[in-house]
Image (cartoon, rainbow, N blue to C red):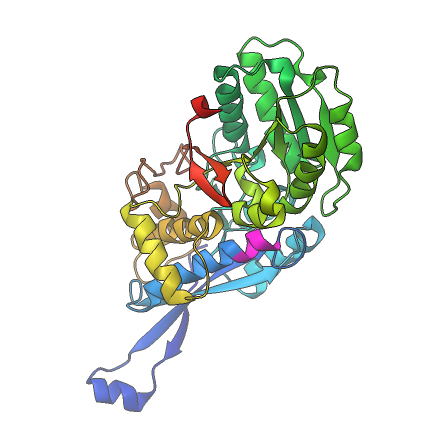
Amino acid sequence: MSTSIAHKTVIPTFLACALGIANVQAAEIKVGMSTALSGSAQALGQGMKRGIEAYFKQVNQSGINGNTLKLVALDDGYEPAKAAPNMRKLIDEEKVLAVLGNVGTPTAIVSVPIANEKKTLLFGAFTGAGVLRQTPPERYIINYRASYAEETATMIEGLLNSGIKPEEIAFFTQNDGYGDAGYNGAMKALKAKGVGNPEELAHGRYTRNTLNVEEALGTILDAEVEPKAVIMVGAYGPCAKFIKMAKEDLPDTRFLNVSFVGSTALAKALGNMGEGVIVTQVVPHFDAEHTTVKEYRKALKAYDPSVEPGFVSLEGFLVAKLFVEGLKHTGSSPNRESIIDALESLSSPDVDIGVKAGFSKTEHQASHKIWPTLLKQGKFVAFNWSEI
């Protein structure tokens, strides 16, 4: 696609004359988002939207190459049946330059083919699923975050190094592509450690967008070896319910969640039952002193002083910042191809999160870093695996 995506709005003549300039045009670049603004994952969708909009608001104060940015966010409720038409509406009707920050694996499974079909960038989706991480990478799919496989592999490494035996590990996962992505990553990591038949470890599953976790809990409680750690790949609601129920029979067991669970929402749902719960993060702590994290806190406060900083909105902010770093290299009339070319040239973008983050034609994932956190007295804090 060679035509510009920017939507031009002519500045009123009287204002142009007052400024002493002629033929002045302000351009609005639309960016799309299909996400969970309602339903079981709404805290994640709202958090990503908040982070993206906070950065866009900051950018729009001075503009980007003479343009401003507008986020068009549609609610899919974390359901693929809604995500697919949302993607087509954003691309075909709203004429967005790219789609940013979509939430979820089941929704990504239907969104990725549409992005490829329509030759429109799907950038920074809030999912670590392999469907967005092909080798070689697909041109129209670019990610910020580490994969679920990397998160669960980090958990396996940490647990085994802390002295927990493979047979003392169990799994609780959502019964769909999201749960499969994390579970399969853990299986691969266990096999790489020489563990035979890890598929025989206790594995309870629940249905997406439900709180029906009782059967999954029963499966884990029936394990031949009582688990000392349960690796969880689910949403915050069912994960919180599972942990509360499981702690009655497994008071000394560790519960480990991947980043998608939504740390703030999980902590609130657990209340005083959350002490010691682990969540692996794909962003640094939102209280960190890295330049970009401090920029995030300032921008979030300017966007909405009532909103508390969190891991999810920080990820949305980073996704938006990386996207704009690419946009800086497209000139005043970006299109759906030039933004991808620009992002692929960002080997060292101006983003400080404590580790190198960037892209190339063969690297469509900005970061591979995992930050483990532990829920302590109601707040998530950084920790080392040796502590467990």
Q: Is residue 65 above or below residue 193?
A: below
Residue 43 colored magenta?
A: yes
Asked where in the image residue 199 lies, by quadrant, the reply is top right
Q: Residue at x 31, y 66 (%)?
A: 63
Q: Residue furthest left?
A: 20
Residue 319 colored magenta?
A: no
Q: Position of residue 288 (x, y in %)?
A: 33, 45
355 relative to 72 in the view: left or right: left
Q: Which residues are magenta?
A: 42-46
Viewer can see residue 162: yes
Q: Position of residue 62 (x, y in %)?
A: 28, 68
Q: Nearer the viewer, residue 248 or 301?
A: 248
Q: Residue at x 34, y 67 (%)?
A: 60
Asked where in the image residue 302 lies, by quadrant, the reply is bottom left
Q: Position of residue 176 (x, y in %)?
A: 70, 37
Q: Nearer the viewer, residue 197 or 110?
A: 197
Q: Residue at x 64, y 39 (%)?
A: 234
Asked where in the image residue 5 lies, by quadrant, the reply is bottom left
